[in-house]
Image (cartoon, coloured by chain):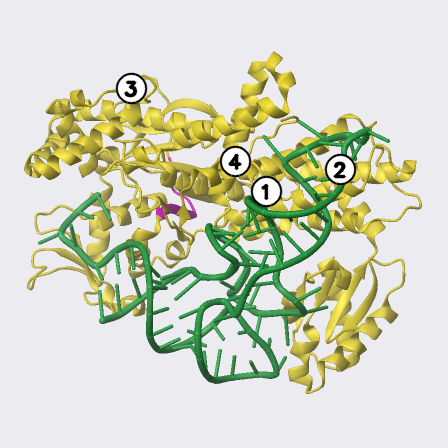
Chain colours: A yellow, B green
Amino acid sequence: MEKTIEKLLKQAIQQQMEIEPDIGELIHYSIEIPPTFDFGERSTNIAFKLAKILKKSPMKIAEELSNEINQNIDNKSLIVKTESVKGYINFFINFKPFFRQLYTRIKKEGEKYGENTDGNGKRIIVEHTSINPVKPLHIGNLRNALLGDCVARIYKRNGWEVEVQNLIDDFGRQVATLIWGILKGHHLEVVREIDDKYDVWLGKVYSHCNKILDEEDMWDEVDNVMIEMRHNPEMYRFMRNICQTCVDSNLETAWRFGVTYNYLVWESDISRSGIWEETLPLLEKSPFFHWEKEGPDAGCFVANLGVLDEFKDKKNPSKVFVRSNGIPTYVAHDVALQLWKFGLAKANLTSRSLMKQRNEAEELRDLWTSTDYVVSGEKDKKFGKTDRVCNVIGVEQNFLQEIVRYSLKLLSLENEFENSYHLSYKHVSAPHARFSGRTGNWLQERAWADAVFEDTYAVAFKAITKKRPDLDENPIKREKIVNSITSAAIRYWLIKFSKETEIKFRIEDATSLEGDTGPFLMYSTVRASKIMSKLPKIKSSSYHGTFKITKNEKNLILQLYRCPEIVRSSAESFQPLIIAKYAYDLASSFNRFYETSRVINAESTSLKHFRGSLVQIFLITMQNLLHILGIPIVDEM
RNA sequence: GGAUCCGUGGCUCAGCAUGGAUAGAGCGUCUGCCUUCGGAGCAGAAUGUCGUGGGUUCAAAUCCCUCCGGAUCCGCCA
């Protein structure tokens, strides 16, 4: 439709205005959806733009162009008429052929409707979740996981090959703290309640350890544990087993929400892989990195970021990459990791297959993990080496992530610099503080992901017992439905905010099932599939005939048409929110259609067929959107 | 001190990239709609100095600057 409009406009402008320059782009960006469809289906403000060039009144230009276009079209073309109003040109489309085209397309593409091949098989790594393996996922970690999960799903549908990584930092201070506590027997002071998942209990132990350490300063001992973990194989094994069990427990949580991964990258494996040893010489060759000889940073390996405009104003534009004791800093490590992701550091990593995961769409995903031991005969697989990298990391790391990105620029890795994306998001906050694993305040607020799931489950269960007493007979089916509703509600709630918005954690919002929520989307598909199940098969040629298309029907058609453009723009901006908002608008349009357009008891056969096919393509489109959002599809609820 | 982000009805948020017609949703409040394909829905009402003040423009919630309020970052921690 837009292309037709562009063509008509271009033609008219060339005939009327005698201006040659490429106004293609100007025309392209001037086409918009009017505030209400009373003004037409599309409109353009091109007359305002041309007014400047031609030094003529916009109204006059709009009028002339509109007249010209009206002469170039007839009632058989896709655009049937145009009107000029207050300088705008409004376009009215011929709905029957438009609908026929759209119907044919959606029916043909089916579950691929909305997808495109922009990625052309290029590869992207999406790294998300990446929590320290000493605690359960809290609601903020879940936001991270869901943003990453949706971006992965979106990229897949834009023709990219996606690799989802979860970085497990088993070598950090947090793990050392926990291990210190366990070696001291402090875990015995924390009761594991009957319904505590392993990671929830570990999280309690971890915050208990922090409390002890804050009271009596024994951080030296933690440092010793950190060193022991690196050099004493038995200590390493002990630590890794605990972390592994915690990760298994974290994975269970992720799966409840439909989140799956391809690869678990362990920090200890990375450290051993020689990745840093590969990276350091690369940096040393660059004129922007050097070993500092004097000043406060003497003896350190330093990045000279001051040469970049972006860092010029910093108080201290240089950044330590290697400490005077020879140990690389976190940022240095992250640069190395980023190089590995792009395939620029080989890293001697071995991997093994863990299991197959299945998500709510019944899609399989192999889970692999990096490993420190290989069982003979096991397959190995190499990860990394992608064209683009998206790291989902909280907003508090903006500055550090910028350093990582700009380090690539200093290494003249322009392409990798352009293709590094830090998906930065704000935190989910408790009423008065941020959630932190150290203080364990997620516990009091019941803000860990499993608890939120349980609380939402309870609300959904209550609702379904009231609405569907018949399901008392079939508790297994009911449980499946309630699980779906729960996952849908929480997933949608955590993606419907923009990344820059700090979400205030209030359980009433998370568990809400009405209005702008996941279950609302599900419900629209339930309505549609109920109609479909009661409708005889539609023959694709049978929606001709004489009938009027109502306002609500037109609105639904126009919404359905937007899907591919929406999928594309959400990938470009790394904003799952765009899909969520669109899906909500689409469901609303359907609900309005549903109220006013009877399908099964339609006044005529041709009308019944037309409406039936509209329901059909709505169902296809909506299900595709739900897949992208990771919301389960059910045919009753 | 420097940097980034945020401020939109009573509450929670979209919209800002690429300025354009009447600033949109949801919750809450009020009024209607179940002999009607499933009411987790729909129709309607009330509620707005788009933080403040200036600038650019034919046109500003959107771009630029000031100030106010809030968040985050600025380590040889991760």
The crowding category of the residue bearing disc 3, from other C-alpha atoms within 10 Å (few below 14, some 14 to 19, many at least 20), is few
Do callouts 1 and 2 point to residues on the same chain?
Answer: yes
Do callouts 1 and 3 point to residues on the same chain?
Answer: yes
Which kind of residue does numbered mark 3 sit on? Glu
Do callouts 2 and 3 point to residues on the same chain?
Answer: yes
Q: Which residue in the structure is indicated by mark 2? A: A615
Q: Position of residue A191 (x, y in %)?
A: 23, 20
Q: Which residue in the structure is indicated by mark 3? A: A193
Start-end of magenta stretch: A383-393
Which kind of residue does numbered mark 2 sit on? Val
Which dot, 1 or 4, sits closer to the camera?
A: 1
Label 1, label 3: how far apart the Cα atoms are? 36 Å
Which kind of residue does numbered mark 1 sit on? Gly
Residue shown at 63% from the left, 22% from the top: A468
Label 2, label 4: how far apart the Cα atoms are? 24 Å
Q: Quadrant of residue B73?
A: bottom left
Q: In the structure shown, which secondary structural element does the residue marked by tag 2 occupy?
A: helix
Q: In the structure shown, which secondary structural element does the residue marked by tag 1 occupy?
A: loop
Do callouts 2 and 4 point to residues on the same chain?
Answer: yes
Determine the chain carrying the residue at label 2. A
Depth order, front residue of A391/B14: B14
Q: Which residue in the structure is indicated by mark 4? A: A489
Along the polypeptide, which appears first: circle 1 or circle 4? 4
Depth order, front residue of A213/A388: A213
Q: Which residue in the structure is indicated by mark 1? A: A515
Which dot, 4 or 3, sits closer to the camera?
A: 3
In the picture, the quarter occupied by the C terminus of chain A is top right
Answer whether residue A173 is magenta in the image: no
Which kind of residue does numbered mark 4 sit on? Ala
Determine the chain carrying the residue at label 3. A
